[in-house]
Image: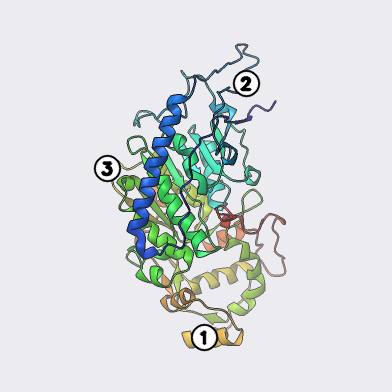
């Protein structure tokens, strides 16, 4: 038997799922919040009724020190017509310690600054950012980790590396079924997102189910909620960008609207919102981010790109650096209970600087450069029949996606993994120098694993 064994919970929660919201308009957000809060209260009351009827849990352990593995806990079977439809909650056996040494996942524990070992619930652990973060927490902390994933086979880290790594198999669409566990969580890290699909699917995952998850947390227990948004919804003063709501894709609009709706929740003062800029990352052990997956093509296009210059600027950050920052935030929750936010990124760079750095890295000389004006860009769009959404058009005209006080590991006195674009190219497997070909590990892109979300992928 493996030292870390997945143990199925036989006391599945018989919770009636919240009815799917049919084609909701974002403008009706207040009604949506009221409905979600009512559903969450109903679910919590239903769970409490079941808990009162459950029998004592028989738990036996092997007393011999050479046989330290714990037996599966036996629980009385709950008869319910919904039981066969409920997804399984799966935990590693390392969490099933004695009641004297480990808190029960069914008993809320009051938060305490003296209690340094936290119970952390993470969504999107199988994506690019998620895997870097979980690896860091496994390696550098003793926190109890609860990882909500639909397919544990996509996890690239060692789930048996240490005690306290708990795989919770499930889908964020059925988040009420994990209500009892969520009541005991000290810190929640919400990374999972839906990147595409129908508008209804995106709104359901990115807004309604995440709001529902927040309502299931215990405000007296949960110290901090780290919510992943996107810097694309902020203006240059770090305020919500109205065009993101008016012109954005369903993903952009959903991220914008979530913050507006979450601001009305009682637990809003526990939220630390992080807004990543352009996310890079991925290697043989980690899924590639959407941008990094396209970096191999830079060797093909740089010979053409080097002859153009453009008036645009942006920030970028590597997923490993994001993990460093989030790890710091987990260990340093806010002293004062109030909403806070951080834009994640290295100092802003111009497009021209990035092209120059890439050319120097790849040993491609720049002989001359032509200004790539908006009218010329529009001409290329027509010639090459490029499909442009209203949001694409806005981005083309907005050009400078820069923000105030962007943070990275250096902000907190920590080492930076990728500080320059050359570092990014090197970490992505792009070999510098003329005549050298690109190398990278094949068969690992897995259809852009960082875009895995609850609509078919998790991120």
Sooner in the amino-acid sequence: mark 1 or mark 3: 3
Task: Determine crowd level at label 2: few under 14, some 14-19, many 20+ residues with C-alpha closer than 10 A.
Answer: many
Report the mark closest to the observer, 1 or 2: 2
Q: Is residue 19 visible?
A: yes
The tag on residue 46 is none
Q: Which residue is mark 3?
A: 336
Quick one: quadrant of the N terminus? top right
Rendered residue at 48%/39% (across/down): 15
Residue 315, placed above or below residue 272: below
Give the Cα distance between marks 2 and 3: 42 Å
Report the residue that reaches farthest toward the front.
Answer: 81
Report the mark closest to the observer, 2 or 3: 2
CB atoms of marks 1 and 2 within 8 Å:
no
Residue 343, placed above or below residue 178: below
Q: Which residue is mark 2?
A: 69
Left or right relative to 271: residue 296: right
Give the Cα distance between marks 1 and 2: 65 Å
Q: Quadrant of residue 435?
A: bottom right
Give the Cα distance between marks 1 and 3: 49 Å
Q: Position of residue 247 (x, y in %)?
A: 42, 73
Left or right relative to 407: residue 385: right
Q: Position of residue 140 (x, y in %)?
A: 51, 36
> Which type of secondary structure does the marked residue at label 1 adopt?
helix
Sooner in the amino-acid sequence: mark 1 or mark 2: 2
> Which type of secondary structure does the marked residue at label 3 adopt?
loop
Q: Which residue is mark 1?
A: 378
Left or right relative to 143: residue 431: right
């Amino acid at each position: 038997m493996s030292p870390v064994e997945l143990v199925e919970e036989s006391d599945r929660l018989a919770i009636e799922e919240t009815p799917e919201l049919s084609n909701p308009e974002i403008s009706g957000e207040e009604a949506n919040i009221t409905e979600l809060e009512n559903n969450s209260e109903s679910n919590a009351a239903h769970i409490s009724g079941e808990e009162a009827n459950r029998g004592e849990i028989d738990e036996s352990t092997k007393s011999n020190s050479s046989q330290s593995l714990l037996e599966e806990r036996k629980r009385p079977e709950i008869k319910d017509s919904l039981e066969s439809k409920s997804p399984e909650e799966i935990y590693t056996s390392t969490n099933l310690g004695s009641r004297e040494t480990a808190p029960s996942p069914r008993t809320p524990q009051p938060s305490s600054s003296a209690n340094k070992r936290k119970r952390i619930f993470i969504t999107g652990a199988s994506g690019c950012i998620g895997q870097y973060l979980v690896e860091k927490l496994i390696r550098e902390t003793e926190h109890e980790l609860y990882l909500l994933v639909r397919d544990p086979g996509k996890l690239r880290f060692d789930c048996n590396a240490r005690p306290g790594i708990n795989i919770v198999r499930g889908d964020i669409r059925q988040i009420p079924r994990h209500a009892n566990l969520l009541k005991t969580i000290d810190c929640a890290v919400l990374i999972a997102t839906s990147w595409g699909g129908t508008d209804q699917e995106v709104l359901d995952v990115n807004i309604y189910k995440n709001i529902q998850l927040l309502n299931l947390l215990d405000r007296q227990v949960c110290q901090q909620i780290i919510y992943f948004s996107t810097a694309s919804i902020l203006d240059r003063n770090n305020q919500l960008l109205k065009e993101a709501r008016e012109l954005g894709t369903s993903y952009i609009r959903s991220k914008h609207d979530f913050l507006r709706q979450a601001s009305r929740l009682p637990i809003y003062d526990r939220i630390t919102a992080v807004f990543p800029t352009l996310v890079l990352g991925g290697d043989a052990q980690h899924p590639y981010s959407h941008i990094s997956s396209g970096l191999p093509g830079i060797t093909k296009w740089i010979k053409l790109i080097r002859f153009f210059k453009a008036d645009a600027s942006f920030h970028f950050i590597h997923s490993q650096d994001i993990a460093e920052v989030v790890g710091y935030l987990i260990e340093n929750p806010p002293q004062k209970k109030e909403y806070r936010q951080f834009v994640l990124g290295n100092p802003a760079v111009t497009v021209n600087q990035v092209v120059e750095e890439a050319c120097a890295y790849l040993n491609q000389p720049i002989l001359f450069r032509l200004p790539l004006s908006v009218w010329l860009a529009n001409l290329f769009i027509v010639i090459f029949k490029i499909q442009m959404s209203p949001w694409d058009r806005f981005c083309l005209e907005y050009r400078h996606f820069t923000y105030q006080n962007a943070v990275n590991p250096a902000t907190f006195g920590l080492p930076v993994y990728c500080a320059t674009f050359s570092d990014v190219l090197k970490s992505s497997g792009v070999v510098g120098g003329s005549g050298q070909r690109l190398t990278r590990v094949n068969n690992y892109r897995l259809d852009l694993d960082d875009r895995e979300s609850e609509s078919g992928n998790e991120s």
